[in-house]
Image (cartoon, rainbow, N blue to C red):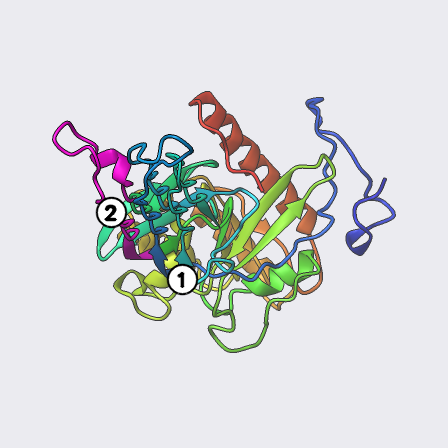
Amino acid sequence: SQIGARFASPHLKMWTYSVGQRLLLLGTLCSLQKRHFVDHRRVLVRGGRGGNGVSCFHSEPRKEFGGPDGGDGGNGGHVILRVDQQVKSLSSVLSQYQGFDGEDGGRKNCFGRNGAVLYIRVPVGTLVKEGNEVLADLSRPGDEFIAAVGGAGGKGNRFFLANDNRAPTTCTPGQPGQERVLFLELKTVAHAGLVGFPNAGKSSLLRAISNARPAVASYPFTTLNPHVGIVHYEDHQQIAVADIPGIIRGAHQNRGLGLAFLRHIERCPFLLFLVDLSPWTQLDDLKYELEQYDEGLSKRPYAVVANKIDLPQARARLPQLQARLGQEAIALSAATGENLEELLLRLKELHDRHVATELEHGRQPLRW
């Protein structure tokens, strides 16, 4: 079959690596879906209230005063954050959660039922903070954190039965659940972070290779929110790509959109640096900003993508750029679709290396 219709060429067909490896050239991505998401939330959580204990006495024919038989109340339900791989942002997280209350105790020593646990689904990579303290880093599928503990159930009068008190009437109410304000912050956005200065063409590149429609204009900071897209390959593999809003010089000092978006790059295992074939100092500047924000961040596996090859003088500058880099840059045009296949193939190679490294160290790689 041919590569996706949008990039199809009568001379470009599916092919395998010359080394005979298993891959079918994943032909293009079927689609790159734009996802709107929220990367931080303030949440008020309350555990469920415990059920009340009961004061009552056993009574039946010929045994009118059978002693205390009031049961305990059930415990209130916890509120628990649970990582779900199907959740990609904090947009579904509400501002308040109330846990389920425990049931009151009953006659005949019947204990109240415990309140059910209330689960809040959050994406992989959610940081849980209370004030400035980090309480949990939910970085793996299935990770859980008890956000609010349910209150203890009250005691029925049977609990207070003693040798010196054979007919206690005391019972206690259930306790309120824990209440706290938590701040959730999402850091893991995608496998690949698309990094570049404003107007480098990041959003245009997403539009060119997908049916996603992030805003595109000729002024800086058109993209004010990160966009996450999923690249679907023909071998059913999926790679998440994040279009991070433009970085400017001094971003690590919170200039421009600054720290709010640098954190999204922090956990991307590999990067795509997008430059536009104007001065090659762009790459050095981008790496500098990443390194100042988090030491070692700029040294992650990466590819350099030289956009706007269709502009005048751009092809003439390409050899200079590659000589400066000491490696090949993927020269393409988001506007015309030229050479997008090479980008898709390189993206797949970076992802496969990441997966192999994670498995080698006994870790489960992020899957979308």
Q: Secondary structure at mark 2?
A: loop
Answer with left or right where residue 200 lies relative to residue 235. Answer: left
Q: Residues within 10 Å of mark 2 (few under 14, many from 20)?
A: some
> Per the image, is 155 magenta?
yes
The magenta segment is: 154-183
Tell me the amino acid under the disc marked 1. Gln
Residue furthest left in the image: 164
Quarter of the image for the N terminus: give it: top right
Label whose residue precedes the other's in the sequence (2 or 1): 1
Q: Nearer the viewer, residue 255 or 313?
A: 255
Quarter of the image for the C terminus: give it: top right
Q: Position of residue 196 (x, y in %)?
A: 46, 60
Q: Which mark is residue 96?
A: 1
Answer with left or right where residue 174 lies relative to residue 160. Answer: right
Q: Nearer the viewer, residue 170 or 236?
A: 170
Q: Which residue is found at the position 80% from the left and 37% from the top?
A: 14
Distance in Å between CA atoms under marks 2 and 1: 28 Å
Q: Which residue is mark 2?
A: 172
Q: Which residue is found at the position 47% from the left and 72% from the top?
A: 221
Of tags 2 and 1, the one toward the viewer is: 2
Q: Residues within 10 Å of mark 1 (few under 14, many from 20)?
A: few
The image quarter containing residue 70 is: top left
Quick check: 23 above or below 97? above
